[in-house]
Amino acid sequence: MADKKIGLVITHAADDPEMATLPFILANGAMVMDVEPVIILQGEAVRMAVPGGADEVIAEGLAPLADLMAAVLDSGLKIMVCSPCLATRGIGEDQLREGCYVGGAGVIVQAMLDCENFLRY
């Protein structure tokens, strides 16, 4: 993919739809600019990694999160999901939608090291 990467750690879902949606807008913009977004879901955001989870997150005035997330996944990019955050919420790896994968602390730190910048939402 791209030579440059930007990391986006997302910690919100339906609890703050705007903060959950904005990083996916940036991710889509990055792809247009030939910058690879590295997306990590932590905290409440892991709920978006299950089928239909993004459908429940609607931010007034912004593009539908489900569409933005689908565009990222349809491009072939994968979305990393925090393993302890899944366990805390009783979500198993087998419940994740296609294109999402589990990463622990070491994998997340390596992803951060590989990126030009990392933003947290």
Image (cartoon, rainbow, N blue to C red):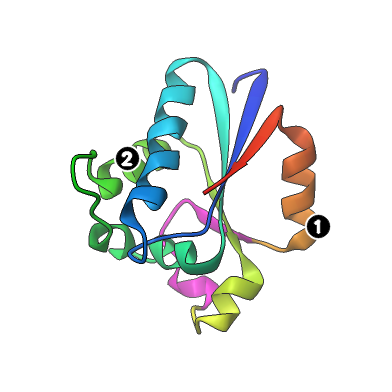
Residue 78 horizontal side relative to residue 102, left or right? left
Amino acid carrying label 2: it is Leu
Whether residue 101 is in magenta: the answer is: yes
Are dots 2 and 1 in contact, CB under 8 Å? no
Q: Position of residue 100 (x, y in %)?
A: 50, 55
58 vs 79, nearest the viewer: 58
Q: Residue at (57%, 28%) from the top-left corner?
A: 36
Write the start and end of the magenta stretch as one range. 92-102
Q: On screen, 99 above or below 56?
A: above
Residue 92 horizontal side relative to residue 72, left or right? right
Q: On screen, 32 above or below 71?
A: above
The picture quadrant where one finds residue 69 is top left
Q: Which residue is mark 2?
A: 68
Q: Residue at (42%, 24%) from the top-left corner?
A: 29
Q: Residue at (39%, 61%) from the top-left corner?
A: 13
Number of on-image labels: 2
Mark 1 Cα-neighbour bin, 10 Å: few <14, some 14–19, many ≥20 = few
Q: Residue at (72%, 43%) from the top-left corner?
A: 111
Quadrant (top left, top right, bottom left, bottom right) of the N terminus: top right
Residue 11 horizontal side relative to residue 4, left or right? left
Mark 2 Cα-neighbour bin, 10 Å: few <14, some 14–19, many ≥20 = many
Whether residue 30 is in magenta: the answer is: no
Q: Which residue is mark 1?
A: 106
Q: Position of residue 39 (x, y in %)?
A: 55, 45
The picture quadrant where one finds residue 106 is bottom right
Q: Position of residue 83 (x, y in %)?
A: 64, 69
Q: Find the distance from the CA under tag 2 to the CA under tag 1.
A: 27 Å
Sequence-first tag of 2 and 1: 2
Tell me if residue 75 can be seen.
no
